[in-house]
Image: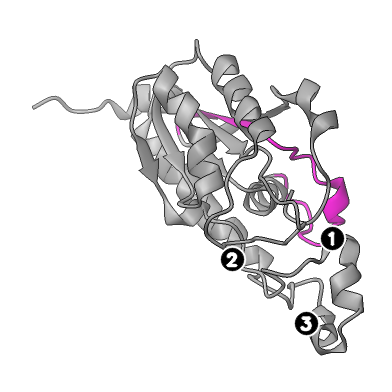
Amino acid sequence: MSRSNPASDVEVRTVVHLVRHGEVHNPDRILYGRLANFHLSDLGRQMADRVADHLADHDITHIISSPLERARETAGPIAASHDLDIEIDERALEAENAFEGRAVAGGRGIFRDPKLWKLMVNPMRPSWGEPYVDLAARMQAAVGSARDLARGHEAVIVSHQAPIWMLRLAIEGRRFVHDPRKRECTLASLTSLTYRGDELESLAYSEPAAALLPLAHSGAGA
């Protein structure tokens, strides 16, 4: 039986690409969160194809996705181009949110309903959903598993904006409290983590579908 060489393992480079899903068909501008049956729009499918084209010549050995439809549909073209199956990881799931199912784009649905105000008392946690620290921790665990699976190669995790951004803030040692409008995590974007052994060597950000972004609809959950 062959044994791994600890010294050589330290030198091995592995890349984990975190992909945010493409645009979702959401004409009512609902904050869809973890709700089922929210699928990619036609534009979202084009975005997924752009990501697949961008990663076509990469040494990808594992495609991992959040269980939600929009993530799996974004992962589909990437998996197909590498002849791989999509692996589901619950840790890549969207953040839990008490405003799920409401039309809250721009905060309008929140401020018009006094019953919801109590959920806004602590934006640092946040009080309306999954704590940022927990969100970052489960994403760190998902990335660690993907890195181990793809050791010496590349892996893709298709997830959602909040989980990806919380992970990035944790990696960069930044405070979790932030303005969501300023997240560097557009639709169908890549946040690529390069590891040397188990140590993070670099973080890069790119937008393969940048040319399509001006066509996307804004709003909650976009």
Mark 3 or 2, nearer chain start:
3
Residue 180, magenta (yes or no): yes
Question: Secondary structure of the magenta portion, mostly?
Answer: loop
Residue designated by label 3: 119
Marks 3, 2: nearer the viewer: 3
Residue designated by label 1: 105
Q: How far apart are marks 1 and 3 (CA)?
A: 16 Å
Packing grade of label 3 (10 A; few <14, some 14-19, many >=20) is some
Disc 1 residue type (three-letter)? Ala
User: What's drawn in magenta, residue-wise?
Assistant: 172-197
Q: Distance between the residues labelled 1 and 2?
A: 25 Å
From the viewer's perspective, is residue 79 above or below residue 21?
above
Q: Which residue is drawn at 46% across and 43% down?
A: 65
Residue designated by label 2: 134
The furthest residue to the left: 1
Res 184 quadrant in image: top right
Image location (x, y in percent) of residue 134? 59, 66
Checking the image for residue 144, the label placed there is: none
Disc 3 residue type (three-letter)? Leu
From the viewer's perspective, is residue 163 above or below residue 72?
below
Image location (x, y in percent) of residue 200? 57, 35
Q: Which residue is drawn at 84% across and 57% down?
A: 178
From the viewer's perspective, is residue 115 above or below residue 199?
below
Q: Please, which colouring scheme is shown?
A: one colour
Q: Are marks 1 and 2 in contact (CB under 8 Å)?
A: no
Q: How far apart are marks 3 and 2 (CA)?
A: 18 Å
Mark 1 or 3, nearer chain start:
1
Give whichever of 6, 204 is nearer the camera: 204
From the viewer's perspective, is residue 114 above or below residue 10?
below
Residue 29, magenta (yes or no): no
